[in-house]
Amino acid sequence: MAKRIVVDPITRIEGHLRIECEIDKGHVSKAWSSGTMWRGIELILQGKDPREAWLYTQRICGVCTTVHAIASVRAVENALGLEVPMNAQHIRNIIIAAHGIFDHIVHFYHLSALDWVDIVSATKADAKATAALAAKLSPWPNNSAQEFKNVQDRLKKFVATGQLGVFASGYWGHPAMKLTPEVNLLATAHYFQALDYQRKINKVVAILGSKTPHIQNLAVGGVANPINPDSQSTLTVERLYYIKTLIDEVGDFIKNVYQIDVAAIGGFYADWTGYGAGVTNYLSVPEFPQDTKGESFALPGGYIPNKDLGAFQAISTFNDSYFSDNVKESHKHAYYKGDANLHPWQGETDPDFTGFQDDGKYSWVKAPTFQGKPAQVGPLANVLAMYVAGHKPTIDYTSKVLELAGSIAGSKLGLDVLHSTIGRHAARAVRAGVLHDTVVAEWDALIANIDRGDYATFNEPVFPKGEIQGVGFHEAPRGVLSHWVVIEDGKIKNYQCVVPSTWNAGPRNDKDELGPYEASLLGNPVADPENPLEVLRTIHSFDPCLACAIHLFDPKRNELVKVRTNV
Amino acid sequence: MSEPTILVLGVGNILLGDEGAGVKVVDLLEERYRFSDQVEFVDGGTAGLELLSCLDDKQHVIIIDAILGAEPPGTIKKMVLDNAPAFFQNRISPHQLGLAEMLSCAAMTDSLPDHISLYGIIPESLETGLELTQTVAAAVEKISRQVLDDLQILGVEIAKRQQRVSA
C-alpha cells in the first residue's frame, strides 16, 4: 500500500512550501506541491504611481529583490513604449548578471550542496589525499592540503560542540549519501570559500545599486546613477575599475571551482541524471538588452516544447507577442475564487481558502501555462535555449561540464542527461559561466560608451490619459519572471507578477496536468520515508523560492513540522 | 573615513503591516538624525546571506525585528544575544531563516560581532498593507529613542536633521 508523506516546510528555501507524496515500493507515485502563503502584492499596488511600483515589488522577496525591481520598471516602460539610454541598460545588465552569479553560487553551495555532501563524513577525510584529488580536477590555488586541514579542524570544532548552525538541517549518514570523505571535504572547503566570493559579487550590486539588499538606483526610464568621470559623488572611473577587480576574482572561482565541483558531484551521482526530468516544456526569455528599445539581446531565450530542441522558437523582443499572448494562469487548484484560466492582464487575486483537497484546491500558487501547457523555467530552460540558438559560450561550458562529469562517471554523457535533477545543477553552473562572460562584456561596453562622451542615464516617463498596458520580462536566476501592469490615467489599475516559482511550483492546471515540481518527483527513489532526502534533492534542484510565488504567512498552518508521515 | 563598527539592522517585510516595524525604525532614525561615521544603518528587508558583508568590521550589532510572542501587541522585548545564531534557529519571525543563516555563516567564518542585541516588537496585524497599526507605530517611536540612547552610550555623535522646508 502506498505511504503518504508530508514535508512541510521544505527547509533551506525562502518562503513556505509543502510537498506531499505517495511512496509506493520505494518510489514516489503521486505528488502535490502546495504553497502555504498567500501573495497580496497585487492588491497593494492598485492605485499607486507606476513609477514607484518597483520600490514595492522588490520587497516581495528577501532573495530576489533586484529581479522584481527590474521586471517592474520594464513593465511600465513597455506600457509607455519608453526607450532606455544605453548607459542605463549596461548598468542594469551588470547588476542583473552580478545578481545572477550571486544567486547561482549561493544556491549550489549554501542551499543545496548539503543534499549531496555529508560534512560529518568530511571530518574523516585525509587532507593530503583531498589535495591530490583536487589537483587532478582544477588549477585552483586554494586547494592545498593546509587549506583542507584548516577547514577540517574548524568543522571538527563545530561537530564537537553540537553547534552545526546552518548545517543542522542536513541528512548526515543517510544511505543516499555516496561521496568519499575526501570529496566531502573538498566540497565543504569550497562551501566556505564560496561565502567570500558571493560577498564579492554582491558588492558589485551594492556599488551600482547604491545599496543592497534593496537597490536604490532604478527609475522608470533608466537609472539614477549620474555619470561624471571627474566627480567623486557620482559613478567614477575609479569605482568602475574596483568593480572590475571584483568581477575578475569571481570569474576564476566560477570556472575553476563552481563548474568543476558541480561536474564532479554530478559524475559521482550519475544515477541522478535518470530522475527528476518532470515537465520538459522549457520556457526562457532573452536577456541583456543591447539597444535602447529591447529589440536585440546578448543572450537568447524562447520556448522548447516536449524537450524537442528542433522545435525551439525564439522570443526576440520586449514586444514579442509570442510571449505576451501565450501566458495564462489557472485557479482551478489554487485558493482563489472560481476556476478561471486568465491572461495576467485580466488576472484576479480574490482569495478563497478551502483547505488541502487532493483533487480540488490545495495551493496558494496559481498554475501558469504557456500555449496551454505547463512549462519548466530556470537555468536549464535557459541553457537549452541558448544551446540550440547556437550561443557559443553556452555550448563550450556545457561541453566542459559534461566531459568532466562523464570522465568521473566513466561514461560519455550527452546533452540528454541535463533533463534531470542533477542536470538542473549542471545548467546553473554553465549559466554562471555565461553570466560572468556577460558581465565582463557589459562592463567593457559601459566604459566604451562613457569614453564616447555619452553620460545619459534617464529618459523622463510621461503618462497619457486613458488605459495602457505593458509586460516586463526578465530571465531571473530562477527563470522567467514577468510583471504585467495595466495603467489608467497614470495610476496602476491592475498588477500581476508571474514569477519563476509560480511556473515551477504551481499545482495541477486547468486540465489537471501536473506542475514541474510535482511531475519531477514521480519515480524518484525514496530509501527511507522518514527521511526523504531524495525528495529534497529534486525540489532543491529548482532553486525554490516561495516567498514571491505566494506571500502571506498562513496563520492556519503555521506549525513547523519537518517531516510528517501518514500511512 | 574609517569603517563603521556599529550596525543598526532593521529587518522585516514592509508589505505586511507590522512585520515591517524593524525597517521603519531604521527609516525613522535616518530621516530625523545625522550620525557620526562609526554607525551604519541597514534596511535588511527579509534578506539573508546578502547581509553577510554588513557584519564585516562590526563590534556592535543592534537588530530590530517583529517577533512572535504571547505578550500584547506593541510590547518591546530587548534581548542581549549571547548566542545569536542559535537564538534565531528557533522560530521567532516569518523571515528568521535568513537571519539565522547569515549569523551562522558569520560564526563559521569567525566574523560574528562580539555584541549583538535584539529589539523585538510584538506585532498586532500582519495583513497585507504598507501602514503600521497605531499600537506598533508607537512602539517604533519608543524603540527609536532607546536605540538613540544605546548609540550615545557607544560614543556616537547624533545631531537632529533640519526639517525639510517645502518649496
Image: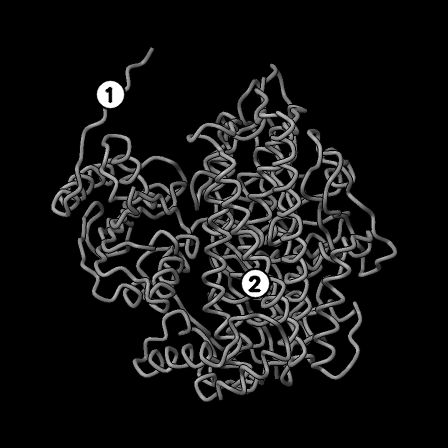
Say what amino acid the circle numbered 1 marks. Answer: Gln
Residue A142 in the image, given as x and y percentages of width and height: 51, 71
Q: Are marks 2 and 1 in contact (CB under 8 Å)?
A: no
| Color style of the picture | one colour
Q: Decide which of A361, A249 is in the foreground and name it.
A: A249
User: Tag on residue B163?
Assistant: 1
- Horizontally, residue A270 falls left or right of residue A415, namely left
Does A190 sit above or below residue A515? below
Residue A533 placement: quadrant:
bottom right
Q: Decide which of A372, A2 is in the foreground and name it.
A: A372
In the image, farthest residue toward the right: A310
> Which residue is rendered at x = 76% and y = 36% of the image?
A320
Find disc 2 in the rendering and name its residue. Answer: A253
Does A325 sit above or below residue B84? above
> Which residue is rendered at x = 41% and y = 41% of the image?
B15
Chain letter of disc 2 in the image: A
Residue B49 in the image, given as x and y percentages of width and height: 43, 57
Residue B87 in the image, given as x and y percentages of width and height: 27, 65
User: Tag on residue A220?
Assistant: none
Does A494 sit above or below residue B152? above
Q: Secondary structure at mark 2?
A: helix
